[in-house]
Image (tube, helix red, strand yellow):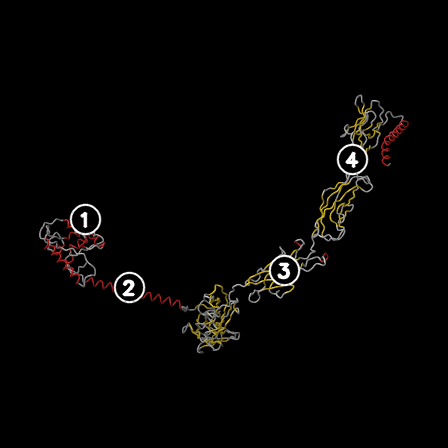
Amino acid sequence: MKKLILLFSLFLAPAFSYKESQKTKQNLSSDNTSHKRLKRDWIWNQMHIKEEIDTPLPHHVGKITSSVRNNNAKYILEGEYANTIFQVEETNGDVYAFERLDREKKAEYELTALIIDRRNNQSLEPPSKFIIKVYDINDNAPVFIHKVFNGSVPEMSPVGTAVTKVTAVDADDPTVTGHATVTYQVIKGDEYFTVNDSGVITTTRADLDREIQSTYEIIVKAKDAPGFSGDSSTATVIITLTDINDNFPVFKHPSFRFKVPENISVGGEVGRVKVDDIDEPQHRNTKYSFVRGDYRDTFEIIANPFTNEGIIRPKKPLDFEKVAEYRFDIEATDPTVDLRYFKSGGSRSISTVTIEVTDVDEPPVFTKLPYEFKVRENDPEIKTLGSVWAHDPDAAKRKIRFVRRRASPNGDYVRVSDSGIIQLPKPLDREFSSSYNITVAAHEILEDGRPSDRESHAQVHVIVIDENDNAPELIYPEEPRVCENAEPGKVIIKISATDKDEISPRGFFKYSLATEDSNFSLVENYDNTANITVKYGQFNRELAKIHYLPVIVSDNGDPELSSTNTLVISVCKCNEKGDFTFCEERAKQVGVSIQALVAIFICIFTIIVFFAVIAMLILLRKRHKKDLSGLRRNVAEIHEQLVTYDEEGGGEMDTTSYDVSVLNSVRKNGIKPEMVPSPYAQVQKPPGNTTSGAGEMEMMIEVKKDEADNDRDLLPYDTLHIYGYEGAESIAESLSSLESGSSDSDIDYDFLNDWGPRFKMLAELYGSEPNEDFVY
């Protein structure tokens, strides 16, 4: 009924408007008769039309009317949708819609109305704009903005906890009551969730458990407000339950068994126990504890933060011979579980762990580590300090042999026997080392007598107790000096002492002068130091520039030892302020170590040996010259010897007259002279009595051999001789010039001296008279 009234009013509004306009115009014409032209206006109101009208097209929208009275007037529409969707009857101004309108596409249209003279197309009135509004009908169902919505809520949340929000939109006019109002309803999963008119989905139960069901898929319907007809739409909502820590871990097995060797290191992994925790990894905080068993001090269980496993580790060494098997119960808990959501009635998660220890061949075990012995230094009676002892921890119980491995300081100061007895081969000196350390290795002896390759070590410390066997020694920071005009009581130097022996807290040094007959005095400071002072004053540099002051230093040890040290005090010239201006330089005492002395002795011995060798060579040389003196011969004997020189003389230019290489090859290659073919062998001798010649030569050679063999003054080596005798059968008689040296020749060879240095040697040979002392 309301719709009919609204439609009727739309049609009547233009008519009433037209009548009111006519009345107004009549009144104005009567009142203003004096005006020549009447005012003309467009006559209509805003037009309206319903959307989606189901009657046949065209649909009447309204009427445009002008006050112009002209039979030739023509109505025209202009605009975007003029003459397409909307058209006007040009004679009466009725406006029609030639398409069904959809308000959701376009809610209003703006057009321009014109009235012209059809004869000349002149405008009779100014153009006028008007709007055609499309009235909404509830023809659209609400549409969700997403087909699928996602939401999440913690498990075990209380009733009414918001999960997510869904949104649907209605394209109808929201200004019309009920047309765009959307309501929501859960049509699937309403036993777990509900939705309000704003689209907020909330829980309806407080026992939603992720471990039972982690996701829910519900369907929500959106429709118009109640009381209005219209379609509806649906959307899917996927709801995920987020995890909370509401479950305790549970062991996967009621018992675990592990096997481990006894030599496992402390902190090593024995095994792992595993649990199931249905919560998500970020909520798995398993803690393991011992429930029953006496070995919680032997093992510990540490949770792995990544795998949630319990890692069993030994806290101390295992021993198969003592305990071969361990058994205890452990419990797995989670201290971070939210007790508000804890499911009561669950049993405690307890599992039994059994650890079997296997036997291995272990090295010997020392009874006490480390070993420490004390001995007084320089005690010759102490030979044995004690012993070390180790045993085989295995069931075999083998014998043990001990060996020394390392020593500090290095040397044979402390020994260990095969049975472990610590021995001293010689007394120890504390001043050399206050402690002696050795490393002792223990070996098991196998059945065949060989030592096992497995060994263990023990440290043996020998502490040397000090005895007072070293006298204190004087020390002073600088060379003592004193002014020659020093006053009595003037402190010359402050002295102190040191002792190689141990100094007890109550130990002290005593100082005294060896003689009182000096110009010096000693004053004790009672802090282990003393001052040397001037006794009378006024030193005389003319008498003595250096004074030697013996000082006795003693300790309070048992026995008391002392030493005398000499202070060398220089007397110097000083200025008025007491500053030293001139002091004599004194010879510095240089200490030489034992190693330096040994080196010096070795050098001296080497020099002595060197000179001895030189002297021996000189004696041998004199002996050799003496032997050569027995070889002196006269000039005739000289000509019987062939002397070969390595280089030629300056005047010997005729070296090509005979072949010298034959003789040199004899000397160099060691070939016997008789093996060298003589150049005279090629001479053809006439036949004759060769027997006599050969016999004479053989006889002469034998004589010479006997002389050489029986002459003790000759050198012990053979000499090559060329003899002037050539035999009786020579056709050229004697061609040798060896005997020319002894012949009476009238030739004077002094002219050779005028030929220069190259003939000097030849001039000396032929220009000198024979001399008995001339020796080659």
Choose top left, top right, bottom left or bottom right for residue 769: bottom left
Q: Distance between the residues labelled 3 and 1?
A: 121 Å
| Vertical order, 526 against 665 (above or below) | below
| Vertical order, 68 against 512 (above or below) | above
Three-letter amino acid code at the position of disc 2: Ile
Three-letter amino acid code at the position of disc 4: Arg
Mark toward the viewer: 4 or 3: 3
Give yes or no for contact between labels 4 and 2 (Cβ–Cβ under 8 Å). no
Three-letter amino acid code at the position of disc 3: Ser
Give yes or no for contact between labels 4 and 1 (Cβ–Cβ under 8 Å). no
Q: How far apart are marks 4 and 1 (CA)?
A: 150 Å
Where residue 350 sits in the image (x, y, percent)?
A: 66, 61
Where residue 381 sits in the image (x, y, percent)?
A: 45, 76
Furthest-left residue in this view:
688
The answer to whether residue 491 is visible is no
Residue bearing the label numbered 1: 656
| Vertical order, 435 against 24 (above or below) | below
Q: In this view, does 29 lie to the left or right of 772?
A: right
Q: What element carries label 3?
A: strand
Q: Earlier in the sequence, mark 3 or mark 1?
A: 3
Q: How many marks?
A: 4
Mark toward the viewer: 1 or 2: 1
**Quadrant location of the C terminus?**
bottom left
Give the numbered dot on residue 614.
2
Choose top left, top right, bottom left or bottom right for residue 184: top right
**Quadrant location of the N terminus?**
top right
Q: Earlier in the sequence, mark 4 or mark 3?
A: 4
Residue bearing the label numbered 3: 255
Q: Is mark 4 on a helix, strand or loop?
A: loop
Give the numbered dot on residue 368.
none
Residue bearing the label numbered 4: 103
Q: Which of marks 4 and 1 is nearer the N terminus?
A: 4
